[in-house]
Amino acid sequence: MALWTEQDQQKFNEIVAQLRNWTSQPCLACKSPLLAEDVLYSNALGLKTTPKCLPCLAKGLEQNQTELKSTLLQHIRRRPCLCKAFELSTGAQPAELDCNFIPPANQPLSSTNSPLIPDLIWDAGDLGCGDLVLLLRGKLRAMLPGKLLKVTAFDPGAPEDIPAWCKMTGNRLVLQQHPLYFIRNKD
Ligand SMILES: [Zn+2]
């Protein structure tokens, strides 16, 4: 389970500002007023400065609206900042949206000063997708079994990619607090 980080808070503040700017403004394509949800869907698709309503987004992507919405909700659920903004703007979580992070109020701040002492520190920067896990594999292979690797990975896909990769390869993800990941090399 991911914790709420300072970065999440920053992103969250940005999204709240976008919601204020764009909700009820006309959709850039069809001119109908945007719902808060539309603003968040647009954000998730990388259209934070050119938001459109869901029907127009679906049309632009040549996708079925219901399927697109479901995909977007899954995406939002995995991103604490978007997830919290969704809750805030809609007043409730839709059934599909089960935010799996610890909200700020419950965050044990002291846990950010983790006692975990890494044997190796690797800054993966913005590396994403295939490159990230490829190099991660190499790092762990060069380490002795049971040793702890601390990875910093800013790629927005890292919160899904790294845990999935660890699970697949049998390495243990000891702590996940994007962009920080502590991985115990499998024995
Ligand atoms: Zn529209």
Image (cartoon, grey):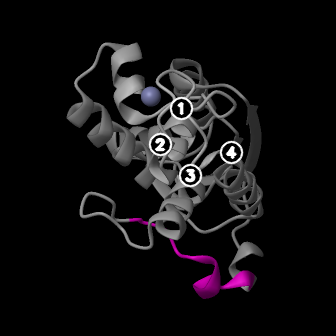
Secondary element at tag 4: strand
Q: Which residue is mark 2?
A: 38
Q: Are marks 1 and 3 in contact (CB under 8 Å)?
A: no
Report whether the residue tagged 2 is closer than 8 Å to ligand 1. Answer: yes
- Of callouts 4 and 2, the N-terminal one: 2
Where residue 148 appears, x then y in whole percent?
63, 54
* 114 relative to 32 in the view: left or right: right
Side of 121 relative to 129 (left or right): right
Pointers 4 and 3 in contact (C-beta within 8 Å): yes
**Which one is earlier in the sequence, the residue at label 2 or at label 1?**
1
Q: Can residue 78 be seen by looking at this rendering?
A: no
154 left or right of 30?
right
Q: Which residue is mark 1?
A: 27
The amino acid type, in three-letter code, at marker 1 is Cys
Measure how far apart labels 4 and 2 are at the Cα level: 34 Å
Residue carrying label 3 = 183
Element type where label 2 sits in the image: helix
Disc 1 on helix, strand or loop? Answer: loop
Decide if ligand 1 comes within 8 Å of the CB at mark 1.
Answer: yes
Residue drawn where x is 34% and y is 24% of the image: 58
Could you tell me residue 10's position as x and y percent?
Answer: 77, 57
Q: Residues within 10 Å of mark 4 (few under 14, many from 20)?
A: many
Given the image, on which type of amino acid does mark 3 rest?
Ile
First in sequence, mark 3 or 2: give its number. 2
In magenta stretch: residue 144: no
Q: Which residues are magenta?
A: 99-109
Residue type at the position of mark 4: Val
Instruction: Please name which of the two marks, 3 or 2, marks the residue nearer to the observer.
Output: 2
Q: Which residue is mark 4?
A: 151
Q: Give the secondary structure at mark 3.
A: strand
Mark 3 to mark 2 CA distance (whole Å): 37 Å
